[in-house]
Amino acid sequence: MAGLPWGLIRLLADGKSHSGQALGGELGVSRAAVWKMMQQLESAGLRIESVKGQGYRIPQGLDLLDAERIRQAIPLPSSAFLSSLVVFPQIASTNATLMEPGYDSGAVVLAEQQSAGRGRRGRVWVSPLAANMYLSIRWHFSDGIASLEGLSLAVGVALAEALETLGLEHIQLKWPNDLWLAGKKVGGVLVEVGGDVNGDCHAVIGVGMNVAMPPHLSDSIGQPWTDLASAGYRAGRNRLASVLIDYLLYMLSDYQQKGFGHYRERWLARNGLANKAVVVSGAQALEGTVVGLSDNGGLVIATSAGEQVISGGEVSIRAVQ
């Protein structure tokens, strides 16, 4: 999907009709070149309307991300922890970018589209253009990778509380890294770490959030899902980004001192699988009922052989219907 005409996308983002001649004049290209760009945008999944005598438009327009607007909306004290904030038009993966050397603690990367977005267990994260939220934050720690147990669950708590401040109620969390709204997946977390097991290390926290998922992509998502627009969210992606970053930076700023224990009860209060029968598959395989969390964030399941703790790894948790 490389090489999309972002100059044209920005001109069409207002949702108004623009003639091919006017667009060509703005971009310094011919009307024929504009037509070819329109074909490219349609191939990328954007809906383009062409009305004779009026020109081209994107119905309802596009809510494009604006790095400066996002940065200015992040309040103190969180903004003091922000080292950089970049919005990429297109990128393979926001997480993969921040895992590269050269980024400081507190660096934030967002993208309008990912060509290789990833979820847990190597799953593809569907990333349509200018529709959802693809966001990653890098943070540095000094107590080693082993001290980061439970971090993805604390991230879930921060995200749920951020969404609640935006008027989105009854957000639930599914162990270890999914956010549910109305019983369906609305977002996910991917935490990747590097560095010393017992010393200086870093974590990259990736967040994917369905904001206004194009309906035609339903068949490409292999589980029940929803988006924020379906729940009535209308404040825009820039507002959403600033609030998510605010809550995440604040949580990360003292996670090393507080640890997961500080977030455990808040996570349990939003546990979408509480007291439900589940099937665990993957590295660990068992059936039972979810009864709680261990002190370090492992999922506690009551089975016929007694309580078992699932501590992460390559596992999948599915509720029994």
Image (cartoon, rainbow, N blue to C red):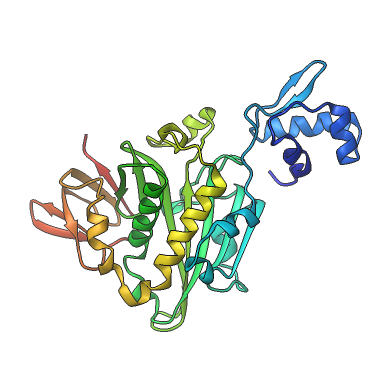
Q: Is residue 203 above or below residue 270?
A: below
Point out residue 92 in the picture as x, y percentages from the top left corner: 61, 53
Point out residue 112 in the picture as x, y percentages from the top left corner: 62, 47
Q: Is residue 279 above or below residue 234?
A: below
The C terminus: image quadrant: top left
State the image quarter where residue 96 is shown: bottom right
Point out residue 161 in the picture as x, y percentages from the top left corner: 36, 53
Give the residue at x 51% y 28%: 215
The N terminus: image quadrant: top right
State the image quarter where residue 127 is shown: top right
Point out residue 220 in the picture as x, y percentages from the top left corner: 49, 34
Give the residue at x 32% y 55%: 176
- Residue placed most toward the observer, 14 or 103: 14
Q: Residue furthest top?
A: 52
- Residue placed most toward the observer, 107 or 5: 107
State the image quarter where residue 260 is shown: bottom left
Q: Is residue 191 visible?
A: no
Q: Is residue 208 above or below residue 77?
A: above
- Residue placed most toward the observer, 147 or 209: 209
Q: Is residue 65 visible?
A: yes
**Side of 289 relative to 296 (left or right):** left
**Side of 13 relative to 269 (left or right):** right
Give the residue at x 44% y 57%: 190
